């Protein structure tokens, strides 16, 4: 009996050690950022800047650029914070229906025509609650609900305006340290228990202002970057999901999604393949610009999850083409009518001629 208890205690200790190794304070360096004002710079083989980020960078991290070129980090200089990369491939993005991604992992999917389905639920939360925007919040970090919560609220409101049920958690996971992802894991599990279609962990990056600034028409917005963890069993599905959203965004709002960073760590994406980390601008951007950017991204989420599969696959251009065709048909119809009336000698004469034509058709 004593030997049985001893073996049981050994197993419990081993289990505790494995959990600590996965999510413990000592071994989550990928959850940390450089001090404010310092950035890692990813450069291509010619020395061109691909990415500036406050996130820590490691060997074998990958970055899919705005123009869909995939680079991999092959050397990291920790003194200069320069990461050198090599080109892996030119990626041809495609859209993978989210229902197929869920089925691949034996997750529940509502069957039937997606057009007829009621819009589902999207879950939102913040691992790093303190993140803020200097120009509008007065600081880059607020101990509590920082400016990032205002951005999360804007995202939730934009989704709700599209008819989507939103489960937005503002649970705190302070402080902003390497243990934050372990603490936010509990929140992610609570949200998952309500069976959302997808989850988004909303952050902001630390980078120079120009890294995320984007002008759409006459309005400035912040661009959005996806972060996917390399160290989880769902990486293949996470990659397809992130690239699907980017393809739709590229068609709706070119440049809105600046790229996809495939970094060391798991960011709790091992819990579900449809959990994506969003970097909504940087601390140097304004919060209103971030709110505008995330509101546009809500349209991307709506189209991917709740638009028709064919419509999502062909993007906004097919919808515009359909509208153009209908408009052309209407224009031709109106033009034909006007021409007929003019040649008949006025509306009254045209009406009489039309009645006579119907009479001849009946005689036939």
Image (spheres, rainbow, N blue to C red):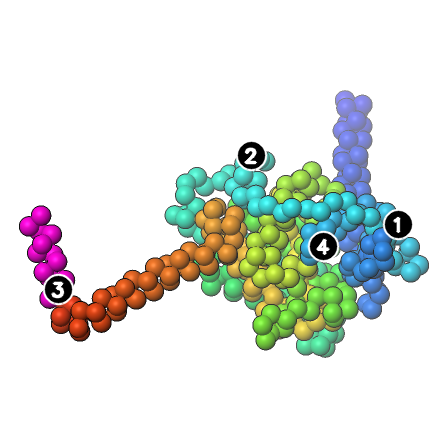
User: Residue 140 appears at what percent x and percent y?
Assistant: 75, 70
Mark 3, secondary structure of its residue: helix
Mark 1, secondary structure of its residue: strand
User: In the image, is residue 285 part of the stretch drawn in magenta?
Assistant: no
Looking at the image, tell me whether mark 3 or mark 4 is earlier in sequence order. Answer: 4
Pointer 2 with pointer 3, Cβ within 8 A: no
Front of the two marks 4 and 1 = 4
> Which residue is at the far right?
79
Front of the two marks 4 and 2 = 4
Please report the residue visible at 83 percent of the width from the left and 63 percent of the height from the top.
39
Mark 4, secondary structure of its residue: loop
Q: Residue 44 vs residue 110: left or right?
A: right
Mark 3–mark 4 Cα distance, whole angstroms, equals 64 Å
Q: Which residue is mark 4?
A: 65
Residue 264 to residue 258: above or below: above
Q: Which mark is residue 106?
A: 2
Q: Residue 349 vs residue 154: left or right?
A: left
> Which residue is at the far left?
363
Looking at the image, tell me whether mark 2 or mark 3 is earlier in sequence order. Answer: 2
Please report the residue visible at 40 percent of the width from the left and 57 percent of the height from the top.
325
User: Residue 264 appears at what percent x and percent y?
Assistant: 78, 47
Q: Of residues 362 and 313, which is closer to you in this image? A: 362
Q: Which mark is residue 75?
A: 1
User: Residue 299 appears at what percent x and percent y?
Assistant: 52, 59
Pointer 4 with pointer 1, Cβ within 8 A: no
Q: Label 1: few (<14), some or many (≥20) within 10 Å?
A: some
Q: Label 3: few (<14), some or many (≥20) within 10 Å?
A: some
Q: Quadrant of residue 294?
A: bottom right
Q: Which residue is mark 3?
A: 353
Residue 364 visible in this rendered orientation of the protein: yes
Looking at the image, tell me whether mark 1 or mark 3 is earlier in sequence order. Answer: 1
Mark 2–mark 3 Cα distance, whole angstroms, equals 66 Å
């Amino acid at each position: 009996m004593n030997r049985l208890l001893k073996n049981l205690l050994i197993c419990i200790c081993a289990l505790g050690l494995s959990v600590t190794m996965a999510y413990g304070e000592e071994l989550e360096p990928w959850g940390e950022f450089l001090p404010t004002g310092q950035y890692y710079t990813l450069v291509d083989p010619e020395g061109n800047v691909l990415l500036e980020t406050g996130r820590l960078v490691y060997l074998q991290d990958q970055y899919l650029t705005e123009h869909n070129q995939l680079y991999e980090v092959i050397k990291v200089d920790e003194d200069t914070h320069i990461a050198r990369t090599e080109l892996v491939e030119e990626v041809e993005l495609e859209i993978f229906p989210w229902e197929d991604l869920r089925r691949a992992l034996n997750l529940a999917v509502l069957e039937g025509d997606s057009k007829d389905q009621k819009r589902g639920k999207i879950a939102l939360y913040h691992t790093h609650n303190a993140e803020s925007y200097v120009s509008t919040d007065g600081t880059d970090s607020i101990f509590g609900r920082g400016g990032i919560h205002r951005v999360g609220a804007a995202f939730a409101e934009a989704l709700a305006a599209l008819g989507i049920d939103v489960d937005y958690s503002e649970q705190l996971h302070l402080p902003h340290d390497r243990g934050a992802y372990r603490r936010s894991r509990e929140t992610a599990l609570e949200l998952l228990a309500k069976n959302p279609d997808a989850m988004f962990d909303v952050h902001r990056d630390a980078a120079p202002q120009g890294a995320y600034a984007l002008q759409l028409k006459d309005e400035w917005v912040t661009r959005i970057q996806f972060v996917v963890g390399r160290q989880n069993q769902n990486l293949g599905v996470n990659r397809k999901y992130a690239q699907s959203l980017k393809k739709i965004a590229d068609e709706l709002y070119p440049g809105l999604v600046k790229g996809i960073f495939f970094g060391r760590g798991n960011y709790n994406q091992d819990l579900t393949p449809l959990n994506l980390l969003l970097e909504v601008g940087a601390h140097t951007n304004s919060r209103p610009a971030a709110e505008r950017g995330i509101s546009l991204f809500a349209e991307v989420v709506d189209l991917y999850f709740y638009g028709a599969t064919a419509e999502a696959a062909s993007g906004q251009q097919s919808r515009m083409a359909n509208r153009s065709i209908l408009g052309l048909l209407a224009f031709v119809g109106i033009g034909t009518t006007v021409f007929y009336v003019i040649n008949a000698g006025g509306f009254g004469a045209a009406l009489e001629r039309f009645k006579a034509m119907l009479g001849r058709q009946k005689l036939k």
